[in-house]
Image: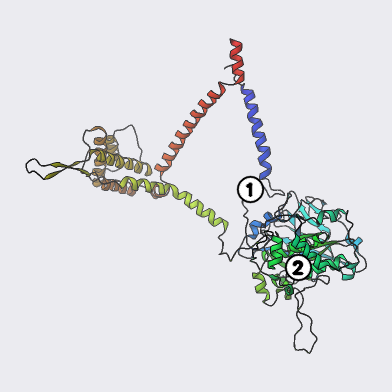
Amino acid sequence: VDVWEASPLASAGRRLAAVGVALAVLLPLAVPGMTGGLLDSLSRSSGNGTGNGTGSGGTSGRIDLFASLAGQLNQSQVADLVKVTTSEQSPFYLRYAVADELRPGGFQARSPSGRPANRDLPDPAERAGRGVQQTTYRATVEVTKSLSMSLMPVYAEPVRTEDLNGNWLYDPNQQVVFSNRENSRGRKYSFDYVRSTYTPAALRAAQPLPADHPVRRQLTATPERVPEVDELVKGLVQGKRTDYDRVLAIYQHFSADNGFSYRLSTESGSSGQDIVNFLTNKVGYCQQYAAGMAWLVRAAGIPARVAFGFTNGSKRDGDTFTLTNLNLHAWTEVFFDGLGWVPFDATPASGVPGSTRSAWAPDTDAPDPTTPGTGVTDAPTGPEASAGPAGPDNADRDTDEGLALGGTTPDEQPPTWPWWAAGVLALLLLLAVPALRRVALRRRRGGRAVSATVAATTVADATEPGTRLVTVAADANRARADAHAAWAELLDTLVDFRVPVDLTETPRATADRLIRDTLSDDTAAVESARLLGKAEERARYARDPLTGERLLPALRTVRGALAARADRRTRILAAVLPPSVLLRWRTGMADTSGRMAALTGRTRYRLLRWNPRRLLADRAAR
């Protein structure tokens, strides 16, 4: 051992340290948590299907709300996601998260924080007062196996939970239940919640937040000042004395009377800003309406955010609502001092199945009530009427997709194949590679002409001036190549049908052993094997190779005889996974590995020659 070479113990220590660091970095990425795990994120697609989608905003924190549902929502078929049973006759939307950080790409969610949800939760009764009615209800939620995320769907103000362990936390600011360690798939739990309703008078009585209030500073921020938005908001809120009147004016702006309509396919604009394009084109779906209203409310100096969850849908059995991917929805929440977060849904009710409206935010597109006797029937009310003139079927077709302001939906997409079909197809293609390689190799060898190939030479005729003679002779080089190709194909055929091959034998010895051990009772196969052995022997050792023989028919005869004597499993493997191809690949990999090892050793030796320790050791020796 040279004095400059590291000791085995030091080398082992460095290797263990490198492995430990690699495990410490890679293992957390593969463990499911708030990020869903690296493997889970790679299996998700960006998706443009119905429901929440991935949008263009994403999140800035650990919880990626869009990606957590992309795998389940990027489907053309309807999938049941949540079943909720509640004692409330007409509940508001079941929510699971909020996006309260506005960036140029759209609304994004911050990482929630809180305390265990199985302990005492904040009591909203302190906000009860004149004009505010609070009623406590009980709900039971069952999440299907089609929905897996680190967030738990609940109604807005839960006060007590059951069947949730300490790993589930509650954030009172965002009003969401989340976990850093578990997911919601297949869980069933119950909770009590408070439903708060407000009168317009109570909202008008709320005082504006001070300019230095933390909620106002954080949740009125916009990424940039947009002159078109500022001018629109200034005109809408002009003369409005209270925050509620300002919010109501912005809310009523998104109405059919102002040209707004619900449509899945949005239109592009030339302004270069998504918010301006939406306000100009006035066409969009829930993510545009929710984010657009929240942006305008923030521009008016009032805190606002985007909440998303599920509408009540159209599948109801008594007190149980079955919510699907068609019921995913987004709406706006506005903060009022002393009252908290109040919901406003600016999306046209005709485009959302199970849409709900309230006294403080009525449906601006609903027909005016008529008095009896005018010949016009009163318009129906309630969730069943929210589908609009086209009925529930039309509402089910017009579903929401996401939350990012700039999101758009594609044209009608053809039915998508399930993910496992692509996996099966890829596996079949992978299994077919050896067979295709074997067929290609056989065709390349058999594509040559039979060994009767001749060469034509033109010479002058001395007896008759002006005439030329054509001399025909065998092409020795081509004959040798044909013999070698036929022999190589014979050896591969023997390997495919599990006949031993000894590369140290002469061609004649191999042919004699094949005849003696396998083909002794088949005269045609015996003659063909002898012909192939003789042709290869002449091509190797004789001055003149064997010409004029039909080698390809001889190959087919021998192959047919071997196939007839082999069992079914051997014949199937010879056709599907030819052992000759696999053997050639293994040999090639072994040779490549050996060359790489030798190259690595030479490179390492050259690099170590300049090791400082070795140079110092040589100098000390001198």
Specify the amino acid type for callout 2: Ala
Which residue position holds label 2? 346
Residue 284 in sight in this render: no
User: Residue 381's x, y, as percent?
Assistant: 77, 77
User: Residue 594's x, y, as percent?
Assistant: 47, 31
User: Relative to 322, does residue 27 appear above or below in the rendering?
Assistant: above
User: Residue 419's x, y, as percent?
Assistant: 57, 56
Which residue position holds label 1? 39
User: Residue 200's x, y, as percent?
Assistant: 87, 70
Question: Which residue ends up furthest to the top in the rendered image?
Answer: 622
Label 2: state its secondary structure. Answer: loop
Specify the amino acid type for callout 1: Leu
Q: Quadrant of residue 347?
A: bottom right
In this figure, which colouring scheme has been used for the structure? rainbow
Q: Quadrant of residue 310?
A: bottom right
- Residue 486 is left or right of residue 456, and the answer is right
